[in-house]
Image (tube, rainbow, N blue to C red):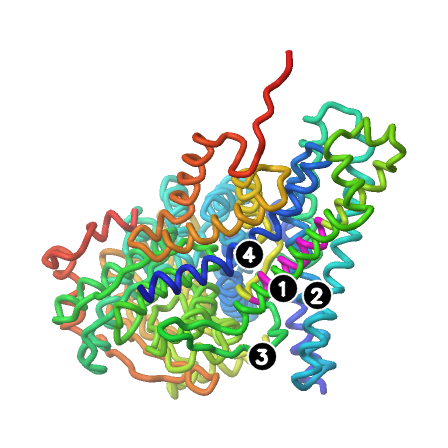
Amino acid sequence: MEDFLQNLLNGIAAGSIYALIALGYTMVYGVLKLINFAHGDIFMIGSFVGFYAGRYMARHATGEAASLGSAALVLLLAMLVCGIVGYLNERIAYRPLRNAPRIASLITAIGVSFLLEYGGQMVFGPDPKFFPTLVEKKIIHLGTITTTNYQFIVLAVAIVFMGLLQYIIYGTKFGRALRAVSFNFETASLMGIPTDRIISMTFVLGSMLAAVAGILYGLSYPKIDPLMGIMPGLKAFVAAVLGGIGNVPGAVVGGLLIGIIESFVGGSQFSSYRDGIAFVILIVILLFRPSGLFGRYEPEKV
Amino acid sequence: MRKLLIVAVALLAVGCPPPSETTSGASGGNEILVGEYGSLTGPEATFGQSTHNGIMMAMDEVNAAGGVKGRKIKVLTEDDQSKAEEAANTVSKLISQNNVVALLGEVASSNSLAAAPIAQSNKVPMISPSSTNPAVTEKGEYIFRMCFIDSYQGASMADYISKQLKMNRAAILVDVKSDYSTGLAQFFESAFVANGGRIVAKQSYAKGDNDFRSQLTAIRSANPQVIFIPGYYNDIGQIAIQARDLGITQPLAGGDGWESPKLVEIGGKAMEGSFYSNHYFAGDPDPRVRQFVEMYRERFGQTPDSLAALGYDAAKVLVNAMSKAAQLDGPSIRDQIAATKGFPGVTGVITLGPDRNPIGKKLAILEVRNGDVVLKDTFEPAGSSAAAAAATTAPTTAPTATTAPAKSGT
């Protein structure tokens, strides 16, 4: 029982990071029907901005209040940088291909992904770096389970940003425009919605969430390197598909589900097959619900 | 001030060998070409860098003293990025394009195992400074090593934990992607069980994983007295942090893969009280060790780890063999390396046995205490006959060994 709760908690903490990344995949897919494979690498850039900014802060700020403030500052800075990278990515690599066959943008996305990974190896160096401790770690005992304030920070920050996204999509004018573009690109543009600007904003928003995920990941697993985005990016992509790609709540549920499944398989005697078993479960779910848990099945009209 | 300057210049000269040097060396000249391949970048980067420093220090000493047979030695260094497939590629390149007469490398057993068959089939002698998996030198008569092997290391750790620390409940966390880790875990387990101990939990991870919490949760429930993790330093730090986060207070134990200045840097306070077996101890009062440590510190500004010491010894043994060889070709050099006897190395007196492994090397057990790595105990080869016996007999007699050690290595 205590293992069950412990694994559940660990799974939720890991899953909420996947969920944040999955949101970026699903939003971009929603408006462009494009799988942005470079998204996992934007997550990596978020971590590295956190690494450099955090180290700088650690040298210039002391005390508990200062450490919380500087952690927030590091987070904002990473979001800003990733937002810019996401914008440039869309503006330079994808917009010129807007009317090209969809496969062209897909290949470009893979190209951008490699560019960021190996460019990152040149800029940051290929060695793993140790992510700075932005907030002092405290160990918390809850009955039979043991956790740290980090896991709660991860959960709280993830929930805040998911709530914020929910508000942006359903409570603002931009959100209404975004939903319109996602519903039907051409009609939205005929109705006077500036589709290009909406798409740019979607990339910026998704990249900012990836930055948040990058910082949270760095806090939880303080070893970062330029290729770190590949696996979490892949898993988040699968999470988005599992939840029903293009569906925002689906991405959150998919991410949490993957985190929890991984955690339970990892704690069993099959720990060496963790990734394999997690993916097999996903394949089985998709066999029964091909459009994902929350996805709508749309028959093609002939 | 002048001393500082010399150190800085030396650092520059060694830190980044200009590429032009490599290409001009290959085109000919009177130099003897020796190939080095190692993990200069990637997750095991400090292994490759330390080994490289050790090799360069040895070779520069030799060249300053006039070289071998009146010819200078040139080391061609290739980075395999801590990947086995790259190790195979770089060794093929060193042999076929650069025509090196001998090879030095690797640290990680998986990488040495990938490169060894290529060296063997081309009849180029290869000395691995610090690959401890037994299967490495079994690849053929051209493959040697400078370090003790995992059957000895695993059994010594098991003996130390069960006899000295009087613990009989251990958990094992093994890296299934690494030949080194699976091999060492097996030898530890069989010796520990032979001593009357019990493995209460056995979990695994794969190199590159970042989340070990689920495996550690399972280990925590089994309540072991010690957790044996025969992995590499970059994973150990993360594992230690997550273990302490989960409230696990028991010491972690490991092998020579922990040896790196990054171990304590990444793991920090979480590493306190944990211990591992190693090839040498930098604080050893032995005059040879002290001289080596002083020279290394002066040149590189840091204390040499065991990988640097073994790299230094491997280079010196190779030079010794080359100067004795009738001709500088693969078979003659090989025969002379095989005949190495009583060679005074930094990591002990080196005598190579018929299986091309050194005989009777000391083993040090180091502990992390107050952020420093200190000597906890040493295993003398003479006193470890029991351990050696356990190592040779245990894998076949212990019923808990899941696979034969030879299989795990290859």
Q: Report the front residue among B301 and A159.
A: A159
Residue identified by numbered label 3: A136
Quadrant occupied by the N terminus of chain A: bottom left
Secondary structure at badge 4 equals: helix
Q: Does the magenta segment cover residue A216? A: yes
In the picture of the structure, the residue carrying the numbered disc 1 is A157
Q: Amino acid under label 4?
A: Ser
* Quadrant the C terminus of chain A occupies: top right
Whether callout 4 and callout 2 share a subunit is answered yes
Give the mark, 2 or 3, whose residue is nearer the N terminus. Answer: 2
Query: Within the magenta stretch, is there residue B34?
Result: no
Residue placed under numbered mark 2 in the picture? A75
Do the dots labelled 1 and 3 sit on one chain?
yes
Rendering quarter of residue A44: bottom right
Identify the element where label 1 is drawn.
Answer: helix
Eye-nearest disc, 4 or 2:
4
- Numbered tag placed on residue A17 in the rendering: none
Q: Give the range drawn in magenta.
A: A206-219
Q: Mark 3 lies on which chain?
A: A
* Residue drawn at x 39%, y 71% as measured from the top left: A145
- In the rendered view, would you say A283 is above or below B53? above
Asked if the residues shown at circle 2 and circle 1 are in contact, with their CB atoms under 8 angstroms apart, the answer is yes
Residue A227 percent location from the top left of the image: 59, 51
- Secondary element under disc 3, as helix, strand or loop, is loop
